[in-house]
Amino acid sequence: MTFLYKLIDLTHALDSTISTWNGGCGFNHDVHIDYADCYGEDKFRVMKVKMHAGIGTHMDAPSHCIAQGRFIHDFDVNDLIMPYVVLDVSDQCHERYSLSAQDVTDFESKYGLIQKDSCVMVKTGWSKFWHTPNYIFPSVSSEAAELLLERGVSAISIDTLSPDRTEDGFKVHKTFLSADKIIVENVANLDSIPPTGSFVMIMPIKIKDGTEALVRLVGLIERDGANE
């Protein structure tokens, strides 16, 4: 049987060189027991992971900055598969760029109104700096965030460390998470998916009372002739 969708991995691989907020190492993956440590014929390598929750391609739950907000484990997986749109501002982006409400309406002039319950993916092109520590990155304006909420979207994602810059007071986080929405950061491979017409799966590690969690982010692109 041929699956109706082509799957596109939108997730960064994790290692000790990945970008983090403070520029330090947010991920360690070490050998705990190696093959040579095992007696007898059965050999295993056992790994040990130490990391921050909010690193790599990950999801922020509302509880990340809203005291009474939902946790990671509260989300039904059926609510984490949704249509998406890619707002591509990579051509005009620079390190101080902020996605504007005009960028949103320009997209809608070309593709139509953004669908309710969709995931908006902001493509800045900054994923190329994934292994660059302490990089300065584009963000999303509070005006754009408010407009997207008016459209009824369920999630916003971006290919940078955050839709906010620290000096702006995390307005997008507060706007989206206080509305019980989702934020996904450090998205990869946005060049590999079309701007509209497909779906995305946001699959977080199911952490009890987690405010953030690593995700495997996957685009589902309908294959040509799938409905024929």
Image (tube, rainbow, N blue to C red):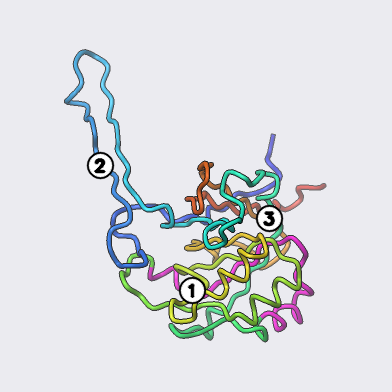
As drawn, the residue found furthest toward the front would be 67
Nearest to N terminus: mark 3 or mark 1:
1
Nearest to N terminus: mark 2 or mark 3:
2
149 in relation to 58, above or below? below
Between the residue at mark 3 and the residue at mark 1, the CA separation in whole angstroms equals: 21 Å
Residue to which mark 2 is pinned: 30
Q: Position of residue 22 (x, y in %)?
A: 32, 67
Is there a contact, CB below 8 Å, between mark 3 and mark 1? no
At horizontal 19% and vertical 16% (from top left) the residue drawn is: 39
- 57 with respect to 119 (left or right): left
Q: Which residues are magenta?
A: 104-129
Element carrying mark 3: strand
Between the residue at mark 1 and the residue at mark 2, the CA separation in whole angstroms equals: 31 Å
At horizontal 25% and vertical 42% (from top left) the residue drawn is: 30
How many numbered badges does the structure rendering display?
A: 3
At horizontal 61% and vertical 63% (from top left) the residue drawn is: 177
Q: Position of residue 80 (x, y in %)?
A: 65, 50
Identity of the amino acid at label 2?
Asp
Between the residue at mark 2 and the residue at mark 3, the CA separation in whole angstroms equals: 35 Å
As drawn, the residue found furthest toward the top would be 40
- 133 with respect to 122 (left or right): left
> Dot 1: few (<14), some (14–19), or many (≥20) neighbours within 10 Å?
many
The N terminus sits in image quarter: top right
- 126 with respect to 182 (left or right): left
212 in relation to 99, above or below? above
Residue to which mark 3 is pinned: 199
Which numbered disc covers residue 125? 1
> Dot 2: few (<14), some (14–19), or many (≥20) neighbours within 10 Å?
few
Residue 55 covered by magenta stretch = no
